[in-house]
Image: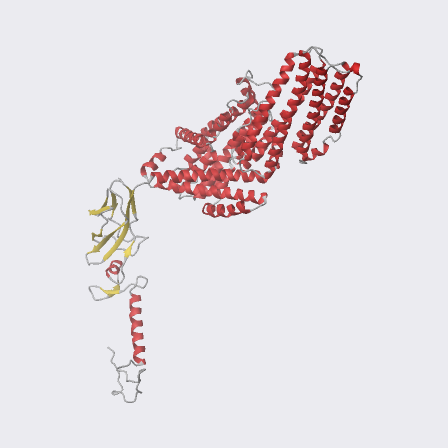
C-alpha cells in the first residue's frame, strides 16, 4: 500500500504549489510510480504464464512432488477459459427427424485434440445452455439427442460441460439452426442464372460473329462436297455462333433454299457437333467470381465506345462474364439441394452404375435439352450440379451424352414445312447423334477410364468431389463432351455418304418442289440468331429473284416471236411476276426483323442493299409483265405490229436481257469478291437509252401512209417504255452494288 508524502514530514523536499499558489494536500513520488509499474508488469507476466500458449503448470501429486498438470487440470483453471469446438454446427430443415450425436468418446484426447481428458476418465456430462426453441438437447447414456422444433427461429447456441471426478471441466459449444427451404428462391435463382447464362451465350455469339464479319461469310462459301472441308467449316462456324442448334438450323435453311446440297450439309452437321463442345472448355476457366466485374467493365465499353470493333469485342467479353455469372447463380440455387436429403436422394436415383442407369441418365439429359432448347445451357446446369457434388461424375457424363440427342430437336422442328432435302438433313442430325450415343453407352466404362487417364493420368482415378477439385470435374465433363463428338465424327465420316443415300431412299422425292420455284419458304426467324449468315441466305434469295427475272425475259422472247402467242406461256410469266411480289414481301419482312436486332454496321449496309435490290428486281418483273400485257392487248383486238417494229423490239429486248445478265452476274461474283463491282458494264445502259429514243423517233417520223394505227402505236410505245424502265431499274441495282446512291 502506497503512502502519501507531505512537506512537513519531509522538510528537504521543495513545496509544490498549485495554480492558485496553495500547497497541494499530497503528491506521489517518482520512485513509487516506478514501483507501481514494475508490480503491474509482474502481474501481467504471471497471467501470461497461465495462458494456454505457455508451458503447463506444475501441480503437486499425492507424494508432494511437482508434476506437469494434465490437460483436464488445465480446464479447471478459471483463467484459462478452455473451450473446444468438438461438435460441428447442426442445421436442419423444418420437419427433420431427431438428430442423435454420440458423446462417449468426444471429450477424450486424440491425435487431432491431444489436450483433452485421458481416455477412460469417468466424466459427468451436463447441458449448461440449451436452444429449446430451435432444438431441445437431452443427454442419456453418453448420447445427445436434438429434438428439432416446429417452427423456424433464430440460430441458438448449446453449451455442454464435461467434468471429471476431481472437478476438472471442459466445455464445448455449437450452434443449432432450423430453417425452412425457400423453394421459390431456389426456382427463381436457378431460372435467373439460366436466363443470364443464355443471354451471355447470345451476346458472346453476336460479338464473335460481328468480329469475324465477312470472314464468316467467306467460310460458308468454302463448303464443298468434300466432307472433311465441310466438317471443318461446321466446327469453325459453330465455335463462332456458340450453338450447334443454330448451325444445324442454318444448314436446314440453306438446304431448303438450294444454297447447300445434302452431301455438303452432312459434313457441316458433323462439324457442328464438335464445335459446340468449346462451351465446356470455356467453363473450365476458373474465373467464376470475376464474371460480374467482367460483365460490368465490358458493358461500359459496349455502351460508350463509338468504334464497332471495340463495341463488339466488349460485347464478347460481356457475354463471357454473363456466362460465368449465370453459372455461379445456378450453383447458388443448386446449393440448397445439397442440404435437402430428399432432393439429394432423388438425384442419387440417377446413377450411371449400370447400363439401365446410363440410359436413364441419357434420357433425362435429352428431355432437359429438349425443354431448354440449348445443349450449352444444359451442359452448364450439369457442370453446376457436378461441381457441388449433387451428382456423380459418371452421372454427369451420361447426362452430357443425352444432351447431344436433345439438341437435335431444334433442327428437326425447323424442318417442318421445308423441302425434302432439308428434312433429310435434319433427320441425319438425329440419326448421327442417336447412333453415336447408342454405341458409346455400350463402351461406357471403357470410355470413362480413357477420360480419367486423359484428365488425371490414371484410369482408376477417383473423380468424386473432394478427391478431385471442382475444376478437374469440369475438365472431365468437357473432355467427355469433346471426346464423344470427335470420336463419333471420325467413325461416321467413311459411312456418311451411305447414310445420306439411305435417307434419300426412305424419304422419297414425291413432295419435292420444282427447281424453279421462287417462293421464300426457307427464310426462318431462327436464322436471325446469326445476322451475318442470315444476310448470306437472304442474298441467295435476291440472286434467285435475279434468276427468275432472266427466266421471265427468256420466256417473253419466245412468246413475242410466236405468230399466235401461247396463252399458257403468258400465264406462266404473269404467275412468276406474282411470285416475285411475294418474294420481295418476304425479304422485306425478314430483313426488317434482322435490322430490329443488334447487328454490326456492315450487316446493316448489306441488308439495306438487299432491300433495295429486291425492290428493283420486283419492279423489273412488273415491267416484263407490262410488255406482255401490251402484246396481249394487240392480240385481243386482232392487231399486230409490222415486221420491222417486231424486229426492233426483239433487238431492244436482247440488249436489255444482256444487261440484266451482266448486272446479276456481277452480284453473284460480288458475293465472293467485292472487287467484282469494277466489272459492271458502263456503256450498256446508255446504249439502251439511245436505242429507245431512236425507236420513238423512227415511229413518229414515218410517212402518213405508213403510220401505225393509234392503238398499235400506243401498245408499241408502252413496250419500248417498259424496256427503258427495266434499264433504269438495272442501273439502280448497279448503283446499289457500287454504293453510289
Residue 467: tell me if it is visible: yes
Nearest the viewer among 631 and 410 is 631
Residue at (26%, 65%) from the top-left corner? 58
Find residue 340 and report its horizontal and vertical position in percent.
32, 39
Question: Is residue 128 found left or right of 560 in the rendered image?
Answer: left
Q: Position of residue 311 (x, y in %)?
A: 56, 44
Tell me if residue 64 comes above or below residue 477 in the rendering. Answer: below
Residue under the image location 29 percent in, 67 percent down: 47
Determine the image quadrant of residue 697: top right
| Viewport quadrant of the N terminus | bottom left
Residue 135 or 191: which is nearer the viewer? 191
Q: How many numbered circles does the render carry? A: 0
As drawn, the residue found furthest toward the right would be 703
Compare residues 162 and 629 and report the one nearer the observer: 629
Q: Nearer the viewer, residue 41 or 162?
A: 41
Q: Position of residue 618 (x, y in %)?
A: 63, 25
Q: Is residue 452 visible?
A: no
Which image quadrant: the C terminus? top right
Q: Residue furthest bottom?
A: 11
430 vs 337, left or right, is right
Amino acid at each position: 500500500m502506497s503512502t502519501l508524502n507531505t512537506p512537513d514530514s519531509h522538510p528537504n523536499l521543495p513545496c509544490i504549489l498549485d495554480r492558485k499558489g496553495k500547497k497541494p494536500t499530497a503528491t506521489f513520488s517518482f520512485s513509487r510510480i516506478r514501483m507501481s509499474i514494475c508490480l503491474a508488469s509482474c502481474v501481467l507476466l504471471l497471467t501470461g504464464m497461465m495462458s494456454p500458449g505457455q508451458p503447463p503448470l506444475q501441480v503437486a501429486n499425492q507424494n508432494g512432488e511437482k508434476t506437469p498438470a494434465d490437460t483436464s487440470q488445465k480446464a479447471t483453471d478459471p483463467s484459462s477459459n478452455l473451450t473446444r469446438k468438438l461438435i460441428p454446427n447442426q442445421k436442419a430443415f423444418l420437419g427433420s427427424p431427431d438428430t442423435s450425436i454420440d458423446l462417449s468418446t468426444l471429450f477424450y484426447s486424440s491425435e487431432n485434440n491431444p489436450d483433452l481428458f485421458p481416455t477412460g476418465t469417468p466424466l459427468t456430462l451436463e447441458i449448461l445452455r440449451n436452444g429449446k426453441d430451435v432444438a431441445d438437447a437431452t443427454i442419456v447414456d453418453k448420447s445427445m439427442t436434438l429434438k428439432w422444433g416446429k417452427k423456424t427461429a433464430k440460430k441458438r447456441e448449446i453449451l455442454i460441460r464435461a467434468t471429471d471426478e476431481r472437478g476438472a471441466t471442459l466445455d464445448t459449444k455449437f450452434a443449432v439452426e432450423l430453417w425452412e427451404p425457400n423453394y421459390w428462391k431456389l426456382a427463381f435463382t436457378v431460372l435467373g442464372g439460366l436466363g443470364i447464362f443464355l443471354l451471355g451465350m447470345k451476346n458472346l455469339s453476336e460479338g464473335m460473329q460481328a468480329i469475324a464479319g465477312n470472314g464468316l461469310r467467306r467460310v460458308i462459301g468454302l463448303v464443298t462436297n468434300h466432307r472433311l472441308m465441310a466438317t471443318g467449316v461446321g466446327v469453325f462456324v459453330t465455335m463462332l455462333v456458340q450453338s450447334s442448334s443454330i448451325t444445324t438450323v442454318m444448314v436446314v435453311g440453306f438446304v431448303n433454299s438450294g444454297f447447300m446440297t445434302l452431301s455438303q450439309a452432312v459434313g457441316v452437321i458433323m462439324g457442328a457437333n464438335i464445335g459446340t463442345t468449346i462451351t465446356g472448355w470455356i467453363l473450365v476457366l476458373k474465373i467464376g467470381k470475376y464474371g460480374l466485374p467482367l460483365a460490368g467493365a465490358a458493358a461500359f465499353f459496349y455502351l460508350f465506345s463509338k468504334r464497332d470493333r471495340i463495341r463488339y469485342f466488349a460485347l464478347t467479353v460481356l457475354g463471357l462474364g454473363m456466362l460465368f455469372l449465370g453459372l455461379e447463380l445456378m450453383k447458388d440455387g443448386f446449393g440448397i439441394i445439397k442440404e435437402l436429403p430428399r432432393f439429394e436422394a432423388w438425384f442419387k436415383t440417377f446413377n450411371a452404375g449400370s447400363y439401365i442407369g446410363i440410359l436413364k441418365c441419357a434420357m433425362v439429359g435429352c428431355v432437359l435439352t429438349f425443354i431448354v432448347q440449348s445443349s450449352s445451357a444444359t451442359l452448364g446446369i450439369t457442370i453446376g450440379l457436378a461441381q457441388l457434388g449433387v451428382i456423380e461424375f459418371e452421372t454427369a457424363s451420361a447426362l452430357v451424352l443425352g444432351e447431344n440427342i436433345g439438341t437435335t430437336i431444334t433442327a428437326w422442328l425447323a424442318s417442318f414445312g421445308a423441302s425434302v432435302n432439308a428434312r433429310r438433313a435434319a433427320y441425319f442430325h438425329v440419326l448421327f447423334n442417336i447412333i453415336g450415343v447408342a454405341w458409346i453407352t455400350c463402351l461406357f466404362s471403357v470410355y470413362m477410364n480413357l477420360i480419367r487417364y486423359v484428365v488425371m493420368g490414371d484410369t482408376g482415378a477417383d473423380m468424386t468431389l473432394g478427391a478431385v477439385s471442382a475444376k478437374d470435374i469440369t475438365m472431365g465433363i468437357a473432355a467427355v463432351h469433346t471426346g464423344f463428338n470427335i470420336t463419333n465424327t471420325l467413325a461416321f465420316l467413311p459411312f456418311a455418304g451411305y447414310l445420306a443415300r439411305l435417307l434419300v431412299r426412305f424419304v422419297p422425292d414425291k413432295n419435292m418442289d420444282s427447281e424453279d420455284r421462287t417462293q421464300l419458304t426457307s427464310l426462318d426467324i431462327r436464322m436471325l440468331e446469326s445476322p451475318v449468315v442470315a444476310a448470306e441466305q437472304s442474298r441467295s434469295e435476291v440472286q434467285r429473284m435475279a434468276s427468275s427475272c432472266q427466266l421471265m425475259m427468256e420466256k417473253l422472247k419466245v412468246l413475242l416471236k410466236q405468230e399466235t402467242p401461247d396463252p399458257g406461256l403468258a400465264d406462266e410469266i404473269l404467275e412468276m411476276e406474282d411470285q416475285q411480289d411475294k418474294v420481295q414481301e418476304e425479304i422485306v419482312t425478314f430483313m426488317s426483323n434482322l435490322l430490329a436486332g443488334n447487328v454490326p454496321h456492315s450487316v446493316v449496309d448489306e441488308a439495306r442493299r438487299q432491300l433495295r435490290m429486291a425492290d428493283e428486281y420486283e419492279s423489273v418483273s412488273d415491267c416484263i409483265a407490262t410488255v406482255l400485257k401490251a402484246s396481249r392487248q394487240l392480240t385481243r383486238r386482232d392487231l399486230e405490229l409490222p415486221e420491222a417494229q417486231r424486229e426492233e423490239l426483239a433487238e431492244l429486248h436482247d440488249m436489255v436481257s444482256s444487261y440484266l445478265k451482266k448486272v446479276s452476274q456481277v452480284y453473284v461474283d460480288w458475293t465472293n469478291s467485292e472487287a467484282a463491282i469494277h466489272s459492271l458494264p458502263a456503256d450498256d445502259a446508255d446504249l439502251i437509252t439511245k436505242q429507245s429514243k431512236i425507236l420513238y423517233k423512227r415511229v413518229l417520223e414515218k410517212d402518213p401512209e405508213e403510220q401505225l394505227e393509234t392503238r398499235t402505236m400506243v401498245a408499241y410505245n408502252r413496250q419500248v417504255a417498259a424496256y427503258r424502265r427495266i434499264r433504269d431499274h438495272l442501273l439502280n441495282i448497279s448503283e446499289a452494288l457500287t454504293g453510289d446512291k
